Image (cartoon, rainbow, N blue to C red):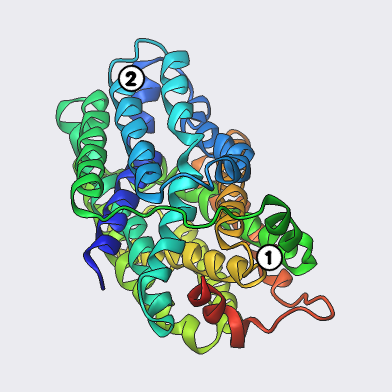
């Protein structure tokens, strides 16, 4: 793989650390600002909602901008966001600092995944995309537990400082080590929009939203679950999140391999496995030892969902890969928003232990939708990876 692909993966690591790093420090922020955990959850869901609403528009608006310049600008804005978050003196200011970078977040994902696929031979495109997406799983391995540990050690504000430094390094690496990526021919907006006529595309996007909502209605409050139900302290939660993310790296890699064999079987196995692990978490959530093992299994399964959503979505709009990718990011983050909100509702209604009963039906609905195919829709098992490779 070319070094530029790994640098884009580092950028993905930086923005995901910023987006999801709050998961481990929500309890600390809630205590410090004297707000409920459900209100603090808006730091994640508000970020995701902004992405969901602005994604396709920002991707279309920046389609003619040099791709390296665009990705570097996104990372620079993430640096500013983290600085503002670290010095925020009110919840309102903190929310503003979170929403600021979310507007351009989808641009980085859509550009990086497509650019990675274009820099290698078609047969290696899925691997290139999985390398970029591995930045996401690595962020759960190092980024989220790191911010949690820093918050436990020095306070939650320093967690944002750490995230800002990561984004700054990625930004400088892009500017100095990656060659320019000019847009040789500006894509026609009309042609891109025409590619969105596929009913199957919209069905897959809805299925992705339900899947991610099921994932995040519990994952968004994982630190809260481990603190209140498993009775872990800050250092132990950091370690558990590290185990979760470490398993996720392996899971992401194996999911990429499985997708080359059978896309739909992989998607269905993923959803059923995640439902099973939620049930195990409910049964053994109060036991430290079993929960550590369950978290490893949970992380192993969890991270592959993003790659599954990426491949299934891009398949249905090969003529407009960046727009399709941005739609996947938008619907995925709509899932994060819905999931986080519904997780908060579950906590208010049933307590933290009852979180899983919000996730399971959402994942079940996503599973059912994998069996729905419109007449004339492409076979994802035969063309999914070729669609990614071609663009």
Name the residue at the right extreme.
375
Q: Which residue is mark 1?
A: 204
Residue shown at the point (20%, 42%) measured from the top left: 172
- The circle drawn on residue 120 is none
Q: Locate residue 2: give its quadrant.
A: bottom left
Element marked by disc 2: helix
Q: Dot 2, crowdedness within 10 Å: few (<14), some or many (≥20)? A: many
Name the residue at the left extreme.
153
What is the spatial separation of the Cα atoms under label 1 and label 2, in whole angstroms? 36 Å
Q: Is residue 148 visible?
A: no
Mark 1 or mark 2, which has the lower sequence index? 2
Name the residue at the top extreme.
89
Image: 247 above or below 169: below
Q: Which residue is mark 2?
A: 84
Residue shown at the point (19%, 42%) measured from the top left: 169
Element marked by disc 1: helix
Image: 296 above or below 153: below
Is 282 in front, or is 115? 115
Q: Locate residue 149: give its quadrant.
A: top left
Q: Locate residue 381: give its quadrant.
A: bottom right
Q: Percent x, y for residue 11?
A: 30, 49
Q: Is residue 68 visible?
A: yes
Indicate the quadrant containing the N terminus: top left, top right, bottom left or bottom right. bottom left
């Amino acid at each position: 793989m070319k070094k530029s692909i790994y640098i884009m993966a580092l950028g993905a690591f930086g923005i995901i650390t910023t987006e999801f790093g709050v998961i481990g420090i929500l309890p600390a922020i809630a205590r410090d600002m004297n707000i409920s955990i459900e209100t603090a959850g808006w730091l994640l869901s508000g970020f995701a909602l902004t992405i969901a609403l602005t994604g396709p528009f920002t991707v279309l608006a920046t389609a003619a901008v040099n791709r390296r310049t665009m990705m570097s600008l996104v990372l620079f804005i993430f640096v500013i966001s983290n600085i503002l978050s670290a010095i925020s003196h009110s919840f309102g200011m903190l929310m503003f600092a979170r929403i600021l970078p979310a507007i351009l977040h989808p641009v980085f994902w859509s550009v990086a995944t497509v650019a990675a696929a274009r820099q290698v031979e078609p047969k290696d495109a899925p691997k290139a995309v999985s390398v970029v997406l591995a930045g996401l799983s690595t962020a759960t391995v190092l980024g989220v537990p790191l911010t949690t540990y820093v918050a436990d050690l020095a306070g939650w504000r320093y967690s944002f400082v750490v995230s800002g430094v990561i984004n700054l390094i990625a930004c400088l690496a892009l500017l100095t080590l990656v060659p320019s990526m000019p847009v040789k021919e500006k894509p026609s907006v009309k042609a891109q929009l025409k590619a969105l006529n596929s009913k199957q595309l919209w069905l897959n996007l809805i299925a992705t939203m339900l899947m991610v909502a099921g994932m995040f209605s519990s994952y968004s409050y994982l630190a809260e679950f481990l603190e209140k139900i498993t009775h872990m302290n800050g250092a132990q939660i950091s370690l558990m999140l590290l185990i979760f993310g470490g398993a996720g790296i392996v899971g992401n890699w194996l999911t990429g391999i499985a997708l080359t064999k059978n896309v739909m079987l992989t998607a269905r196995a993923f959803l059923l496995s995640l439902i099973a692990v939620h049930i195990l978490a409910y049964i053994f959530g109060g036991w430290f030892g079993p929960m550590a093992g369950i978290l490893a299994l949970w992380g192993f399964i969890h991270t592959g969902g993003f790659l599954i959503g990426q491949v299934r979505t891009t398949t249905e709009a090969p003529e407009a890969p960046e727009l399709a990718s941005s739609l996947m990011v938008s619907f995925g983050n709509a899932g994060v928003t819905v999931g986080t909100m519904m997780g908060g509702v579950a906590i208010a209604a049933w307590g933290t232990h009852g979180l899983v009963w919000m996730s399971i039906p959402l994942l079940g609905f996503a599973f059912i939708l994998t069996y729905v195919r419109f007449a004339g829709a492409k076979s994802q098992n035969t063309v999914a990876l070729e669609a990614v490779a071609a663009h």
